[in-house]
Image (cartoon, rainbow, N blue to C red):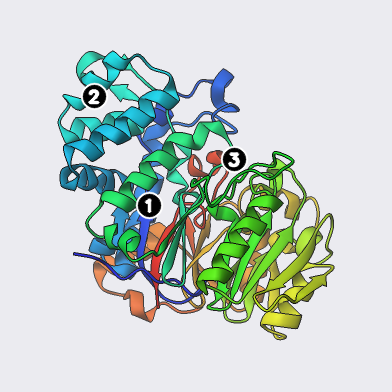
């Protein structure tokens, strides 16, 4: 059965979301290959999975277990529903990209769909004790694979080769899975991998946009970061398609330093309430190495020297900025690095963060929020002393010894497909 796909806000109550539990492929990352695979450190997988399980349990309590969609389940169900021809075409594309012998294609086609799903995600073929592919550890950051903008879905295109197989699998899920395949028939999928619509520029500037650089603030305004991972040419190309289809009225290009510390705009700010944004002061308020361009469907353009000035001028003059590390160095720099600005809102005023940013916690308390550790909240839900609908003005702190090593917070680990 098809599901409603609609997101017109960063903070409206979350109703349906895609996540990915850290898989066995992550345990194969060696120190020498960590940087190539876009991880800053090697991690201890069992603890990372335990921490992610706490995260997923929090999500399930707020949106319902059936509305927390796991990518591994979605891929398996897509394979179950697809024709053999469609499955064969997807495997052929992956074999071609990975430059593997054709004999591997036959081997993959003979697998049952459960084993095929595990192999495509982890890269490891258990029956043969063979490593076929590199792991795709960044699949835990489902924010980057696709973005729902009002009632359309943008299939993103990663900047780094290490994430290309994620893209193949995402496209397959959205085309083949029964709950999503109506989107394509209705013309509500915008595929950045379609070179007919999104070719390189004449100067060979490539198209790449990752979901951490895309935020829909309201039904009219779509923010896209121009960053280490997202190109200006891609933003301009997507803007034209969005305006032609009438998806949004304004596309806002937020130019930030091309630095791994700020790889996406959600590493420097996220909205958690009607009047509250969590922000990294040097870039968001002071405009260090940053400026904002607003493009409107009527052809008008506007410019702002900082993200703060843009929000005050065009979105909400009462917007307040809660500063990571209380806006004081070196704490703001440390806590921006450990995703103090990267939160996902479950509803206005309720958001998830990591439990390792004490100065940012002080800033939350000063802004009127209480901090509750995720494990304490789950215990309160279990014993009946608290219900999700009773939670207000609360920042939920996740255990994060291992999750934080991957360089992405709760905003990164969620791909909302319905809010409202």
**Number of callouts:** 3
Residue 286 visible at all: yes
State the residue in front, 259 or 63: 259
Q: Residue at x 75, y 74 (%)?
A: 310
- Residue at label 2? 108
Question: What residue lies at 22% left-to-right and 14% top-to-bottom?
Answer: 128
SS at mark 2 in the image: helix
Does 29 sit above or below residue 176?
Answer: above
- Whichever of callouts 2 and 1 sits on the residue coming sooner in the sequence is 1
Residue at x 51% of width, y 42% of height: 401
CA distance separating discs 2 and 1? 25 Å
The residue beneath circle 1 is 19
Whole-percent x, y for residue 348 in the image = 49, 78
Residue 10 percent location from the top left of the image: 52, 70
SS state under label 1: strand
Say which label, 3 or 2, has the lower sequence index: 2
Horizontal relation, residue 100 to residue 117: left or right: right
Q: As displayed, is residue 58 above or below residue 389?
A: above
Badge 1 crowding class, 10 Å Cα cut-off, few under 14, some 14 to 19, many 20 or more, is many
**Which residue matches tag 3?**
159
Which is more toward the observer, 201 or 145?
201
- Using residue 271 as the reference point, say whether residue 142 is left or right of it: left
**Secondary structure found at label 3:** loop
């Amino acid at each position: 059965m098809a599901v409603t796909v609609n997101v017109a806000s960063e903070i409206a109550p979350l109703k349906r979301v895609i996540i990915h539990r850290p898989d066995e492929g992550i345990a194969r990352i060696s120190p020498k290959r960590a940087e190539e695979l876009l991880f800053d450190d090697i991690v201890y997988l069992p603890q990372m999975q335990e921490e992610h399980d706490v995260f997923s349990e929090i999500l399930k309590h707020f949106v319902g277990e059936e509305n927390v969609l796991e990518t591994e389940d979605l891929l398996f169900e897509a394979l179950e529903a697809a024709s053999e021809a469609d499955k064969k075409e997807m495997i052929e594309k992956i074999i071609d990209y990975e430059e593997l012998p054709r004999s591997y294609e036959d081997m993959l086609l003979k697998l049952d769909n459960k084993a095929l799903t595990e192999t495509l995600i982890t890269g490891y073929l258990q029956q043969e004790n063979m490593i076929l592919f590199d792991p795709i550890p960044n699949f835990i950051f489902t924010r980057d694979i696709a973005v729902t903008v009002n009632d359309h879905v943008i299939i993103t295109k990663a900047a780094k080769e290490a994430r290309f197989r994620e893209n193949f699998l995402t496209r397959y899920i959205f085309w083949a899975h029964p709950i999503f395949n109506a989107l394509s028939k209705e013309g509500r999928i915008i595929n950045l991998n379609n070179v007919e619509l999104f070719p390189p520029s004449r100067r060979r500037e490539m198209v790449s946009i990752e979901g951490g650089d895309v935020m829909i603030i309201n039904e009219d305004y779509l923010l896209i970061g121009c960053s280490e991972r997202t190109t200006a040419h891609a933003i301009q190309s997507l803007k034209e398609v969005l305006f032609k289809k009438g998806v949004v009225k304004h596309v806002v290009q937020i130019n930030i330093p091309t630095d791994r510390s700020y790889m996406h705009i959600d590493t420097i700010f996220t909205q958690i309430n009607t009047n509250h944004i969590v922000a990294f002061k040097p870039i968001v308020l002071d405009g260090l190495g940053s400026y904002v361009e607003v493009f409107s469907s009527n052809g008008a353009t506007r410019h702002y020297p900082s993200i703060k000035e843009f929000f005050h001028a065009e979105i909400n003059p009462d917007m307040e900025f809660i500063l990571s590390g209380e806006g004081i160095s070196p704490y703001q720099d440390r806590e921006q690095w450990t995703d103090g600005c990267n939160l996902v809102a479950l509803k206005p005023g309720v958001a998830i963060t990591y439990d390792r940013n004490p100065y940012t916690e002080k800033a939350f308390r000063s802004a009127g929020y209480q901090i509750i550790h995720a494990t304490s909240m789950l215990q309160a839900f279990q014993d009946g002393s608290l219900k999700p609908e009773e939670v207000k003005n609360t920042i939920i702190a996740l255990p994060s010894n291992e999750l934080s090593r991957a360089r992405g917070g709760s905003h990164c680990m969620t791909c909302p497909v319905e809010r409202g």
